[in-house]
Amino acid sequence: MSERSWEAEAEELRKLAPRHFLFLCVANSARSQMAEGIARSLAPASVTVSSAGSKPSRVNPLAIRALDELGIDIRGHHSKSVDSVSPDDVEAVITLCAEEVCPVFLGKARRIHWGLPDPAGAGATEEEQLQSFRSVRDELRRRLSVVFGR
């Protein structure tokens, strides 16, 4: 069975127009936090956007810097456990794990998997690490722009 392209999945989400998106990864520190910030900047005000992880830690400072470059402020975000999110109103779950096991989310939400590399710890220098965050940020923005028709 071939995996559907992210474009087809993004288009499906755009047509479904979920009222609550949840982004998941393990630590809820980089990919899912950036996805939450970007989605909030693109989604209509009536859409709820959240993120969580199976082993929450802290928001990575490089995720904050990468989104600052786009004028998106996630300084007020904090890492949350997937167990703290009620499945009742979540209509779309996007998992972002690539090299680790993604959290499981129970409920009736439409599930999509966009495996993106974890930028945390990538690169030897801070500039190389920041470039990894920028690459993931730009890919998330590209995909979420399709979801939200922007």
Image (spheres, helix red, strand yellow):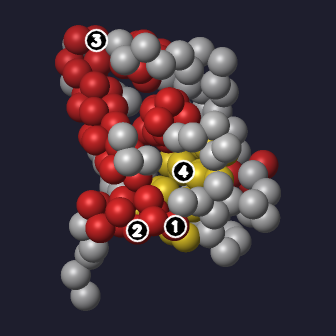
Figure quadrant of residue 103: bottom right
What residue would you read off at disc 1?
Answer: 16
Q: Secondary structure at mark 1?
A: helix
The x, y position of residue 6, in whole percent, is: 29, 61
CA neighbours of label 3 inside 10 A, class few (<14), some (14 to 19), many (20+): few
Please tell me how crowded label 1 is: few (under 14), some (14-19), or many (20+) other residues with Cα within 10 Å. Answer: few
Does residue 36 appear anywhere in the picture? no
Q: Are marks 3 and 4 in contact (CB under 8 Å)?
A: no
Residue at 69 percent across and 39 percent down: it is: 80
**Residue type at tag 3:** Glu
The residue that label 3 is drawn on is 126
Q: Compare marks 4 and 1 and give the one earlier in the sequence.
A: 1
Q: Quadrant of the C terminus?
A: top left
Are dots 1 and 2 in contact, CB under 8 Å? yes
In the image, residue 8 sits, relative to residue 72, either above or below, namely below
The mark lying in front, picked from 3 and 1, is 1
User: In the drawing, does residue 92 fall left or right of residue 34?
Assistant: right
Badge 2 or badge 3: first in the primary sequence = 2
Sequence order check: which comes first, mark 3 or mark 1? 1
Q: Position of residue 86 (x, y in %)?
A: 79, 57
Q: Which residue is mark 2?
A: 12
Question: Which mark's residue is nearer the viewer, 3 or 4?
Answer: 4
Q: From the viewer's perspective, is the residue at label 4 or at label 1 nearer? A: 1
85 left or right of 25?
Answer: right
The residues bearing labels 1 and 2 have C-alpha atoms spaced at a distance of: 6 Å
Q: Give coordinates of residue 30: x percent, y percent.
A: 46, 32
- Left or right of residue 87, residue 116 in this image: left
Q: Earlier in the sequence, mark 2 or mark 4?
A: 2
Tell me the mark number nearer the camera, choosing from 2 and 4.
2
**Residue that mark 4 sits on:** 24
Above or below, 139 against 108 in this view is above
